[in-house]
Structure formats: structure tokens, C-alpha cells
Image: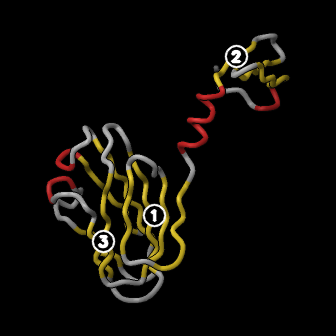
Amino acid sequence: MSNKKMSELSSLTIINDTVIIGNDSGNSYKIPVSLLKTYINTYSPRIVSGVVSSITLDFSSDTIVHAHTNASTFTITLSNLTAGKTIEFYLYKDQGGTTQVNTGVSTSSLSTNNSSFYLATHTISYFKYICMDGTSSNTFVYGIIS
């Protein structure tokens, strides 16, 4: 389906397990409901409650994760490594001082060629984890610290 504005779509019908979207030109597009559910559920963020000093990122269920910390060391553990899966992780530093973030990947798999990033006072950081083949040796992370 080409990129159409919602105003150009004239109808939306659900028959059995298929969504049928029509436009003013008489064209219709059939999309399986399961595909829509997969797309929508793919981007459900997990918001960690409270202020934490560690987190486990689960490749079988996480896609986007957000947490707050004020710890001097923050540890990320990776579980259920899944080939082709990515996780975006946002970490906010609530208080002063430097935080060492241990990423959970090997030195050669980190964009800084080290196993940790360091956060300064009141900063947000973004980490993107990419699991290539389901193994820790081919799971990579890069980070943006602002």
C-alpha cells in the first residue's frame, strides 16, 4: 500500500481475520489482523517503575525499555538472545555524579570498544542492542549519551 493520508482512505472493514481498507479511487487493501497485531505489539514500551540500579533486557519480549537510575554503577543483563532482534533502551540519570553503565556485551561488541559507558549528571542515554545470531559474541550495542 502506498503512503496515503488517513483523509484519503474512505472505508475500513473487518471481515473474519482481515482488515480491508478502501480509498476514494476504488482500490482496497487487505491486511491480516495478525499482521496488524504483530506491528502494534512490536512497539509496546516497557517502563520500569521506580529508580533502579540494574535491569534485565529480554530479547524475547522487550523492544523499547525506559528506566531511571541514580546509582554510581548501573548493570544491564541480557536474556533470551534472539537472532535478528533489537532492543532500544533509554536510561535517565536522576541525580548528580557519574554513573558507569555496564552494558552486558563483550568489549569488542561495544561502539566504544570498552564494556561500559559513563553518564554525567542529569543525562538521558540511548542504547540500541542488536542480536545478530542468538549468541552473546554477536550481540552488539551502541549508545548515544546526551
Instruction: Determine the secondary structure under disc 2.
Output: strand
**Which residue extends farthest top?**
26
* Residue 145 placement (x, y as % from top left): 38, 67
Q: Which residue is mark 1?
A: 90
The residue at the point 55 percent across, 46 percent down is 43
Disc sitting over residue 75 in the figure: 3
* Residue 28 placement (x, y as % from top left): 75, 14
Query: Looking at the figure, which quarter contains the C terminus?
Result: bottom left
Amino acid at pointer 2:
Tyr
* Residue 119 placement (x, y as % from top left): 34, 76
> Residue 10 versus residue 106: which sits nearer the camera?
106
Crowd class of label 2 (few under 14; some 14 to 19; many from 20; radius 10 Å): few
Left or right for 124, reference 132: right
Q: Which residue is mark 2?
A: 29
Amino acid at pointer 1:
Tyr
* Residue 142 placement (x, y as % from top left): 31, 55
